Amino acid sequence: MDPLIAAAGRALAAGDPLGALNRVALREDAPALALRGIAMAQLGDFVRAKILVRRAARAFGPREAVARARCVTAEAEIALASRDLAWPARALDAARTTLEAYGDRVNATHARYLQVRRLLLIGRLDEAETTLAALDPLPCPPALRTAHELMVAGIATRRRRARTARAALVRAEHAARHAGIAALAAEVESAVRALNTPVARLIATGAERPLRLDEVEVLMESKTLVIDACRHVVRDAHAAVSLARRPVLYALARALGEAWPADVPRDRLVALAFGGKLADESHRARLRVEAGRLRRVLRPLAGVRATKRGFALTPRHAPEIVVLAQPQEERHAGVLALLSDGESWSSSALALALGASQRTVQRALDALAASGKARSVGRGRARRWTAAAVPAFTTPLLLPASFPGR
């Protein structure tokens, strides 16, 4: 092998992109183009990196299938880093198949991890967890073992499994030290900080306090009846009911949960559920109908009883009722949660990750920009969005997850 190419490859593996560029910056052959592209990606210039990697893939001949597959894998990683979630996943799957066929197991495993990262970003946790469980990180280099444990921690965080996430991050720290890559160690350190930061608020008997993920996990394993305002789910130790598609019933359930054990006046319930400032007879009739619907939906968990001035919740099995709320109430919390990861997102990638239309996401971005919570860079198709400032809380509970959010 060309000694300069070999030296540049070792520099990239050690997290030294400038050292790699010093060796191949002026070369135009296919291996040098590929290494230059990876170096530019490590330096954060994703546009230039994508161009160089694509040039390298074209420059490799038809007989160099493994090299071309490696270029496709590198382009997929660049796409994920730049939050281009619409990048064709089939191309990465074909590249992985080629790498496996030719015995390049390390890069084939890396391609698998890229697939898991994409699934995690778009909230397909079941598929991500199944794919990750089939991978054995022990034979992999330390950098890939670190990536594996970071993904285990990411899935566990979204599942509210704090103990699993913390154990994975301990293993990730150990693997990152062996890898000796500063950027990788910093990523693990950032994940540890996030795990120790409040992720939600507990509202009970009129008072509230912040909760870390560990405390959320303990709460979910207790006998308490929890009205989960992050997932719009009501649950206790026996059952769970989703109100995600029934906003009126969710608004009523949350108001009654926040007031427990007291009742809530009818006028207040009308204002919260229907937006009416004054409750006339038609509003009261509609409230009775919706209260009856809520009573039927929550029958396995709680009773909804009428009082002289309004309605109240009565748990069937749980000793108490609490509300698990977002760390900060925000109309466009899902968009802000994704932007807070520090990467630049396009509106189309945000729409794909949230399962919403691009126009809906664009309206949310405009509202966040107007309030100073988001900012954009670039124009047209090159426009990217980031959070205006890093929030003082982590937001895994705001991100997409399949019900019941185990």
Image (spheres, grey):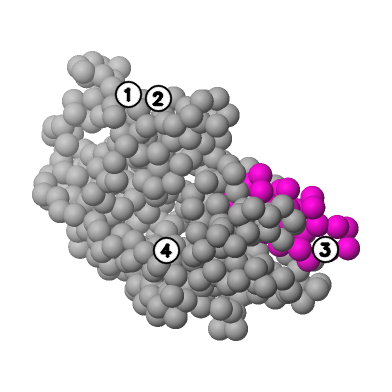
Looking at the picture, which amino acid does disc 4 mark? Ala
Q: In which quadrant will I find the C terminus? A: bottom left
Q: Confirm whether the magenta stretch covers residue 16.
A: no
> Which of the two marks, 2 or 4, is nearer to us in this view?
4
Q: Residue at x 25, y 42 (%)?
A: 328
CA distance for labels 3 and 2: 45 Å
Using the image, tell me which numbered label, if any, was put on residue 366: 2
CA distance for labels 2 and 1: 6 Å
Q: Confirm whether the magenta stretch covers residue 74.
A: yes
Determine which residue is flagged by label 1.
370
CA distance for labels 1 and 3: 49 Å
Residue 346 placement (x, y as % from top left):
51, 36
Residue 393 placement (x, y as % from top left):
26, 51
CA distance for labels 4 and 3: 30 Å
Image position of 55 with respect to 218: above or below: above
Mark sitting earlier along the chain (4/3) = 3
Please provide the residue range marked out in magenta.
Answer: 50-79
Residue 110 placement (x, y as % from top left):
62, 67
Mark sitting earlier along the chain (3/2) = 3
Looking at the picture, which amino acid does disc 3 mark? Ala
Determine which residue is flagged by label 4.
183
Q: Secondary structure at mark 2?
A: helix
Mark sitting earlier along the chain (1/4) = 4
The local crowd at label 2, few if under 14, some if 14 to 19, many if 20 or more residues have their Cα within 10 Å, is some
Can the viewer see residue 236?
no
